[in-house]
Image: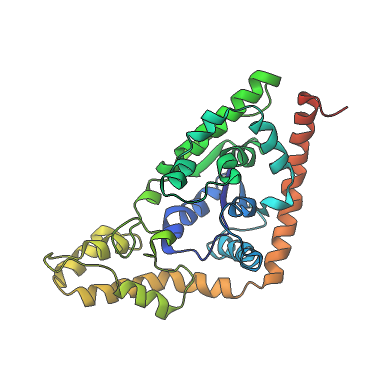
Amino acid sequence: MQKLFTGLQPSGALHIGNYFGALKPFVELSKEYDSMLMVADYHALTTLRNPDELRANILGVAKDYIAAGIDPEKAIIFKQSDVPEHTELSWIFQCLVTVPFLELAHAYKDKVAKGLEANAGLFAYPMLMAADILLYDTDVVPVGEDQRQHLEYSREAAAKFNNAFGETFKEPKEKILKAIATVPGIDGKKMSKSYGNTIPLFGSKDGVAKAVMSIVTDSNAESPENVYAIHALVKEKYELSDLYKTNKGKYKALKEALIHDLESVLAPMREKRDSISDEDAKRILQSGGERARERASKKMADVRKKVGVAI
C-alpha cells in the first residue's frame, strides 16, 4: 500500500476552511493509503512563543483529526517532537542545500516582504518539512496549489542526498487539493486566521451563526456570492438552485439556511470532539509517536551509515 503523509501546525483553532480544504479530503484519502498525520509542533515554534498555548494546541490538533473522522487505529497520528529523527535529518539536508536555494522559499520571502521577523527556523523550514516527508518513504502528500513548492524542495533534498550518498530517499508526489485555495472567508478573501475572516470549525452554534451573519454581501447583487460559495461546500449546487431562486434578494433567509446546513455537518463533529479528553489525546499521540519512531529510526540508521557518522 502506498504511503501518504500530511501535517497540521498547532497554531490555533481550526476553521471550516481547514476542514473543507484539507481535513475532509484527507479523511477520505486516508482510507486508501498507509497514512501518517503529524502534529507539526516544531514548525509552530517559528511563530508561537507561548508554551501553555502550544501545549493546548497540540492536544487540540489531535482531537481535531479524530473528530474529523480519522481512525487512530488505522492512521498514525503523532507529534513531530516525539520523533527526534526529524530534526536530525533536517540538519543533514541543510548541509546539502545552498543559502540562495533556501532564499527562494515563498514563506520566507513573504515574511521578509511584510517586514516580519524572518528567523533562522523559518529560513530552514523547507528542510525540516523535507525531513518530515522523506523519513517515511512517502509516496503522496496532499497539498494546496500554493504549497506545491514544499514538495519541490523535498524532491530536491532527496535528489541531493541520493547523488551524494547513493539511492536512499524516494521522491514524493504531490496530490493537489483544489479546494484549499478556494474556500472563501466571510469577507470573500481566502479564509485565513491571519485575515480574521473565519467561521470556526469547532466553535459553538452561536459562534458559527454570528460569523455567518457577518458574511459580506453586495447590496446591488441578486444573489449573495460569498454566502453561496460557502454554502456550496455543504450542499450540491443543484440542491441550492431552488433555494437561492426562491429567496432572491433575501440575504438574511439565505444566511439562516447556511447556518442550518453548516450545523448539520459541524454539530456531530463538535460533539465527538467534546467527548475526547486530554488524556485520550495524549495516549493517541504517545502510541502514534512510538509507531512513527519505529519507522523513522530504521531510515535514520541507513542515513547515518551512508553519511559516515555511524562507526
Residue 88: name its quadrant.
top right
**Rendering coords of residue 281 (x, y %):** 67, 66
The mark total stands at 0
Which residue reaches farthest right? 311
Task: Classify 105 as above or below 257.
Answer: above
Q: Position of residue 98 (x, y in %)?
A: 58, 27
52 or 285, which lies in front?
Answer: 52
Q: Is 270 in front, or is 57?
A: 57
Tell me the residue at 56%/30% (across/down).
99
Q: Is residue 207 visible?
A: yes
Residue in view at x 76 percent, y 35 percent: 300
Q: At which x and y percent is residue 77?
A: 65, 54
The residue at the far bottom in this view is 206
Say above or below: 98 vs 22: above
Give left or right: position of 115 versus 127: left
Residue 212 lies in what quarter of the image? bottom left
Residue 184: x and y in percent read 33, 58
Of residues 92 and 123, the one nearer the viewer is 123
Image-quadrant location for residue 134: top right
Residue positioned 11% across, 66% down in the render: 220
